[in-house]
Image (tube, coloured by chain):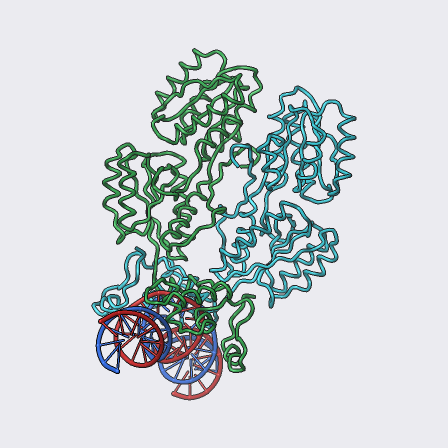
Chain colours: A green, B cyan, C blue, D red
Amino acid sequence: MPVERPHVVDKVEKKLGMTGREPHMRPTTKDLAKAVGVSRTTVDRVLNGREGVHQKTIDKVNAAIAELGFVRNISAANLAKGKSYRFLFVLPQSGDLFLAEILRHIKEAESVFSADQVWADVHHIDENDPNKIAAYLATLSPAEFDGVAIMAPETPQVRDAILRLQERGVRALPFISNQPLTGEHWVGIDNNAAGATAAILLGRFIHATSGNLLIVAESMLSRDSLERRLGFDEVINSKFPHLHALPSLETYGSPERARTILSETIKRQENIVGAYILSSEARVPLAVLEELALPSHVITVAHERTPYTEKALRSGALDALVTQDAGHLVRSAIRKLRALTDMRNTLESQEKIRIEILLATNL
Amino acid sequence: MPVERPHVVDKVEKKLGMTGREPHMRPTTKDLAKAVGVSRTTVDRVLNGREGVHQKTIDKVNAAIAELGFVRNISAANLAKGKSYRFLFVLPQSGDLFLAEILRHIKEAESVFSADQVWADVHHIDENDPNKIAAYLATLSPAEFDGVAIMAPETPQVRDAILRLQERGVRALPFISNQPLTGEHWVGIDNNAAGATAAILLGRFIHATSGNLLIVAESMLSRDSLERRLGFDEVINSKFPHLHALPSLETYGSPERARTILSETIKRQENIVGAYILSSEARVPLAVLEELALPSHVITVAHERTPYTEKALRSGALDALVTQDAGHLVRSAIRKLRALTDMRNTLESQEKIRIEILLATNL
DNA sequence: AAAAAATTGCTGCACGTGCATCAGATTGGC
DNA sequence: GCCAATCTGATGCACGTGCAGCAATTTTTT
């Protein structure tokens, strides 16, 4: 049974001069004060970094904190402050299945974190108009939101808008799409490594002694795509020189265009032994590849787990999936934003987003 | 900035007949009571399942809970109850590097969860003596621990001890080692799938058109090893019939024995194209394999990420690693135990332990 | 030594929920 | 219509921390 604190007994013990504190009860600010020989007010001043405390006293309090192993009861603190966390996810609009997964997990996470007074909203932006994005970010104030997770392509306008947002006191967190130079905080994977991982899978799964690799992207304009491609090429060139990665085919999200450029390329190239779909929306390219009925020895690798790619993996249309856990991304973003507003640290090992490899057996 | 609840303004608003509640403030039990038209006492009775409330009233309260979207403030509740969570991890003793990782993450997790009044102890048991394990579990009482995560081989004695533990009111959670029939709660991976995943990796990485696969285990007595082997064989037989999995070699944890049986087997078998180390301690077999200097085309797959296997992966001594995240395992166990003592549900998607595949590029 | 500044303490309420006690109110059975 | 049983309410303290207002003490400056 959970431990219920026995109020009365506690008091009696205190009267008898005992500590009144079971070994599994953490010291409180009151205990701290008693240990140091100051009042709770002074302890409070130290804990919350208020000024007007002598350095010597500060040191003594900190020493006692270390010795007693004092940990601030955040629940009680938040309760006292009546604090709540209002976060916003700024995401591209698009019918992307991966994005749908992200949205689903935001809803899910909100219900879990609701017990901790966390609110998560979503706002969709036109990801192709950096000025619009920057303009929208400029409207956000600390009065509305404590933190914002932003998934947007890296452009100078957006980067500046994020910096200004932070200056206004709104914690901003680059989300999935990396925004370099905005600080060390961000949630996502190393896309270079993701591309390299896809390359190893293709390189090792392909048994042919030579051949060409089809590379399909939605667009090569984004930094993420570029990084994946770079990481991919690096590995193919250094470890699998018998394979040749073709120039990236860009679908621009259009099924018709995808069909045209893919079928043309396949007709032209005789010796295709593998296909790498590096965009986060694999549905269109995958559907087209299935239509075109490539020989069965052609290995296909794509990114991001969605209902569609999952099915393709199960059916064998896809040989491997390099993905990041959408739920983890969302929860990590929320935890990081919360830590940022509380000026706490997060647990590195928990927040590191893994580059996951999925085969038909470990879905 | 975080939202500070403006006490004074609140009161004024209430006087003016407003709700006094910003849209991002969750309704409290007081609001609930007002909405239903009962007292906070009655709401409390319903929320905590106390008896003596008319069914009609219960329904009305529940309806209001749904309508207002009331979520009990667990922080406040725990604060009021002075509740703390004392959990125990019962683990094998052994110098296993994987176990060391688990231990490290328990320490780490304790510091994180300490803000939530969670205490995590560790007790080591002799994993080879089911009676001793059962006897130890019999000594645990709800007065000491609210929940216990147990990593122990499946035997009837242990299973019974776990059941009796649960009857005494101590939540028990099978940890990593599955204990079937003790309920749906457990933390770990499907070892059958893990073995199957290793098999796919080996099968696809090996380019030879025929050959033998070395299988190394610490012992085949545990259910986990058996399941991995079964999952492995199933995939090899059905999808890679040109490969032949040799009988399992058991090291019993002894480096000398490992060296002997491995070198003998390798001498006898001419055509070894792959090695699968299915035990959680890969260090000894891996070291021996390196000593024996197998040809470079031999593919090696092992389980569990440790500093040692990580290094082997980086150096190329190992081609792939099938692993489970030790930090995730530990945190998931703590979250599940907490949910069990609170009789809450956990988030399925967060607690599912993934079978991860690691290559040199996605460490 | 007196005045000013810096440091520390006291008191008391607030947050949302749990819980105990006692007092009313409503219902049902006869 | 009366008593008992069942249901509901009122009141108040507790948990650990934050915070405001003011008083008391110590240290530094003039």
Quarter holding residue A285:
top left
The mark total stands at 0
Towards the viewer: B74 or B264: B264
Q: Position of residue B220 (x, y in %)?
A: 73, 41
Towards the viewer: B360 or B207: B360
What residue is drawn where x is 39% and y is 29%? A225
Towards the viewer: A146 or B197: A146
In this view, A344 is above or below B274? below
Question: For this view, does B137 lie left or right of residue A277?
Answer: right
In this view, A352 is above or below A62? above
Quarter holding residue A82:
bottom left
Q: Position of residue B152 (x, y in %)?
A: 67, 51
- Confirm whether residue B25 shows in the render: yes
Question: For this view, does B265 lie left or right of residue B105?
Answer: right
Q: Position of residue B113 (x, y in %)?
A: 49, 57
What residue is drawn where x is 75% and y is 42%? B254
Question: For this view, does A128 lie left or right of residue A320?
Answer: left
In this view, B361 is above or below B118? above
What residue is drawn where x is 28% and y is 62%? B21
- Confirm whether residue B37 shows in the render: no
Quarter holding residue A75:
bottom left
In this view, A170 is above or below B278? below
Which quadrant does the N terminus of chain B fall into? bottom left
Q: Position of residue B93 (x, y in %)?
A: 68, 52
